[in-house]
Amino acid sequence: MTVRITPPVHPGEYLREEFLEPLGLTPYGLAGKLGVPRTRIERLVREDTGVTPDTALRLARFFSMTPEFWINMQGLYDLTITEMAANADIQAIEPMRLPAA
């Protein structure tokens, strides 16, 4: 298990705190600029849903970033949440040992 110093950050929280609020954008306004339903961005910033590859591509284009930034953030968030929830089960798995040569 990896030791985590800080709790995982949902990409929606990051989008809300680092982009929408400082730029004065609303989820509705961003959705319009991205060409997606407003509910997609509303659910994302409420942290009800994650970043899809399509959303990552659109956010990357709009904010002049890479889609990997958004996908990696989502992947790290998902991995950390799962690791925290399943830690006991994961720790109970006996690692395979390769025979000595």
Image (spheres, grey):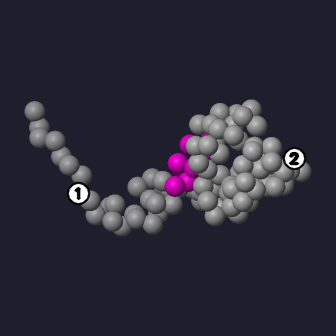
Q: Secondary structure at mark 1?
A: loop
Residue 9: x percent and y percent? Answer: 63, 55
**In the rendered image, is residue 66 in sight?**
yes
Give the residue furthest to the right.
24
64 or 93: nearer the viewer: 64
Residue 71: x percent and y percent? Answer: 58, 43
Disc marking residue 10: none
Residue at point 79% right, 55% down?
Answer: 27
Q: Amino acid at mark 2?
A: Leu
Q: Is residue 43 magenta?
A: no
* Classed neighbour count for the residue bearing mark 2: other residues with Cα under 10 Å, few (<14), some (14–19), many (≥20): few
Q: Closer to the N terminus: mark 1 or mark 2?
A: 2
Disc marking residue 94: 1
Q: Quadrant of residue 43?
A: bottom right
Q: Quadrant of residue 57?
A: top right
Which residue is label 2 attached to?
23
**In the rendered image, is residue 6 in sight?**
no
User: Could you tell whether 97 is left or right of 2 in the image?
Assistant: left
For the record, the magenta segment spans: 69-78
Residue at point 16% right, 41% down?
Answer: 98
> Is the magenta region chiefly helix, strand or loop?
helix
53 or 95: nearer the viewer: 53
Q: Secondary structure at mark 2?
A: helix
From the image, which quarter does the N terminus lie in? bottom left
Residue 41: x percent and y percent? Answer: 72, 55
From the image, which quarter does the C terminus lie in? top left
> How far apart in space, not on screen, are marks 1 and 2 (Cα)?
49 Å
